[in-house]
Amino acid sequence: MSNVIEIAKLAKEASISALQLSTKIKNDALYKIANALNLGKDEIISANNLDLDNANLLLEKGEITQSAYNRLKIDENKLRDMIQGVRDIATLEDPVNKIIWEKDIAQGINLKKVSCPIGVIGVIFEARPDVISQISALAIKSSNAMILKGGSEAEQTNTAIFKIITSALSEINEFPKNMINLIFSREDVKIMLDADKYIDLIIPRGSNSLVSFIKSNTKIPVLGHADGICHIYVDEFADIDKAIPVIIDAKCQYPSACNSVETVLVHKNIKEKFLPSLIKSLKENSVVINSDEEIKQEYSNDINAIVSDWHKEYGEKILSLKIVDNINDAISHINKFGSGHTDCILTENDLNSEKFMMFVDSSGVYKNISTRFADGFRYGFGAEVGISTNKTHARGPVGLEGLTIYKYKLFGNGDIVNDFTTGLKQFYK
Amino acid sequence: MSNVIEIAKLAKEASISALQLSTKIKNDALYKIANALNLGKDEIISANNLDLDNANLLLEKGEITQSAYNRLKIDENKLRDMIQGVRDIATLEDPVNKIIWEKDIAQGINLKKVSCPIGVIGVIFEARPDVISQISALAIKSSNAMILKGGSEAEQTNTAIFKIITSALSEINEFPKNMINLIFSREDVKIMLDADKYIDLIIPRGSNSLVSFIKSNTKIPVLGHADGICHIYVDEFADIDKAIPVIIDAKCQYPSACNSVETVLVHKNIKEKFLPSLIKSLKENSVVINSDEEIKQEYSNDINAIVSDWHKEYGEKILSLKIVDNINDAISHINKFGSGHTDCILTENDLNSEKFMMFVDSSGVYKNISTRFADGFRYGFGAEVGISTNKTHARGPVGLEGLTIYKYKLFGNGDIVNDFTTGLKQFYK
């Protein structure tokens, strides 16, 4: 049996044992991990230095970007945030064993819908070692077993953090072994994708092509997000004074985030009043504008008159700009080219915002607010596994609740269906 | 472009238009369909006779079973139930546009989590023409577009019912075209499974191998149920007078249903008191018992001493019988061989029932009640799409709620994230 299958099998067993974990034991485990990470700071930073040495070579060869290098690097600040993140998850409400609803379905027959963990979750994430403690903490709090595969560039750091976490957990007798597992290679991922007997959900964090590859190669449900192609539509009834800061925030506050804006659509009736100041602000913030020849001629030579690839997530300070004839065209453009992530209307007209928020088929539909708010922390979930553009199970920022499902508990006293089909007994209406 | 891709594309457009459907229009549509089905009775029965003629030939050649033939056949009673089923769905609560929760995440920023339809759902179902009106009605009530593929043996009947439904819908101006679609061939299904750009969910109703094939051949999320291998565990603290009727009901009330019991596990401490009467009752109800040589020697020559295939769903009056040493062995057996459908403990001991209901990893965990209660109607959902053994999105009997997802609506007044990262503003705790 391959090592990964063995890991998956043991994780499945752990997930069953974990069903009895009390909130107190789980929180104790989280505080223990936080303390252990704090004590293991030097170890983590040494391991990280090994990864950074390798990454430096890749950076020189141009094989990774500076921002990838920055994500890989762990310093005192990042470590402090990581540790605080684990403690924060301890303070969140336990998402399992909650009675979602209950009712008597007939005399003496009580039905309860009760939240429970999903079971075993495989998470494939980028070379960001701070993710490993966050995902592990979410797994523990939601009583799920996890199999983690981090980016290979972070192998030393991941291993160091993983060892600290599992060693802390091993000190708690009531805590099942094999709850948190780490795998390393692409080959391991392939085996994991075949282990639908043991693994209940795969969460890939990464590029569109990674998510698509995974969906094509597994029978296991996949909770992923494709691109983050977010739009802001400036309605003819927009308040210009609000619109400019929102667009600048959505584009510039953190351009590589998936919730930053890629395309601004402007209603033709407002363009003369609005475009000169928008273009001026964008230039002041070093944003490159892609639009068409007509806009370039009319408003600014600085605009690139190129046919925008509306499907493209720039991830940097580049913005596509388009004039639309009406709100319907804006909605159609977004539903056609968007990724169902987060899209915003800027307007003072309630009918238009209602229409936009009804017909735009995205996980987040916003009115007069920056798309950068699409985030589990900002929504008050305390933590997030990622942002889902799925239309089943969990959509938008996914917190602890997205790591749960439910079971139905039915309590009777020797009841049989035959008494109901013969009419002897009746279900309540 | 293939016809199926064109259908899927138009269904996607229809699903967007459907976002504005009011409850009233949807209910009007359902009543109109019910009336049209009533007026079209003769048409449906004539079409069904054509299918039955073909089915008769297959039956003679032994290519379909008598129960498949019975499922195909539509008589006055079945038609009346079909029509009533559509009317019943009109009376259910509208599952979309419900505010699941809302909160202010910061001064002046309001977040609403609102239920909405999934979009386009592909349903692949067996040769049971009564399903087409039920699924169509659920689609309409939940504002989802549907692409239906029924069993080929029911092609004439399905076509007749489909024409009546779409013709009724076409009389309602506000109702989008192309909401309900019918496809026919296996080739069409293959194309549908590739249309992840347009289709958001596939629901296969059928055999384990069909569901597995579909999961292996699509990137689209699949909501299916595998086998229904249900267990009853007779604890050492069971009340024998309750236990026998529950087991007989669970096995005999409708043996081909997925929620009927396949395996009874009996605690060793109760076997002497319990087995003679259980075996007697099972024999009286013509149930074939598979167990081992020891049980056969001790209790009855009528028992088949064969090694049971614990993974097998008999679907008829056959029952596997096993003695277990304790409740832990019962739980392990169920988690190993069960299908996560519905499993029951018979006991008067609350600690044991709590343990069983916690550790058995199934969509339904029952205490002292027949497994045959696992059903959307009996749970009070008014209707069901099927029973899911998935551990994501929807589990157990799936009613209208399982055909919905949600979007987040965020309302601001020009708010930007930068004000929060600089500390100028704070999120509420």
Image (tube, coloured by chain):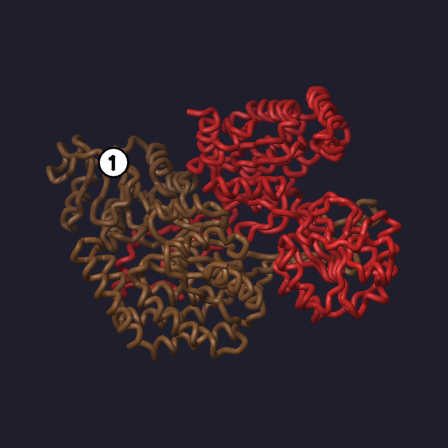
Chain colours: A red, B brown
Q: Nearer the viewer, residue B369 or A382?
A: A382
Please give the name of the residue rendered at 27% of the width and 61% of the height, measured from the top-left corner.
B71
Identify whether B356 is placed above or below A229: above
Residue A315 position, x and y percent, is 73, 44
Identify whether A169 is placed above or below A300: above
Identify whether A289 is placed above or below A428: above
Please give the name of the residue rendered at 62% of the width and 51% of the height, measured from the top-left corner.
A396
At label 1, counting other C-alpha atoms closer than 10 Å, the crowd grade (few under 14, some 14-19, many 20 or more) is some
Q: Nearer the viewer, residue A300 or A363?
A: A300
Question: Callout 1: residue from which chain?
Answer: B
Residue B286 position, x and y percent, is 15, 49
Please give the name of the residue rendered at 41% of the width and 50% of the height, measured from the top-left corner.
B224
Q: Position of A212 compared to A264: left or right? A: left
Q: Is residue B342 visible?
A: no
Quarter of the rendering containing residue B326: top left
Identify whether B255 is placed above or below A154: below
Residue A281 position, x and y percent, is 87, 54
Q: Which residue is mark 1?
A: B322
* Picture mark count: 1
Quarter of the rendering containing residue A294: bottom right
Q: Is residue B341 visible?
A: yes
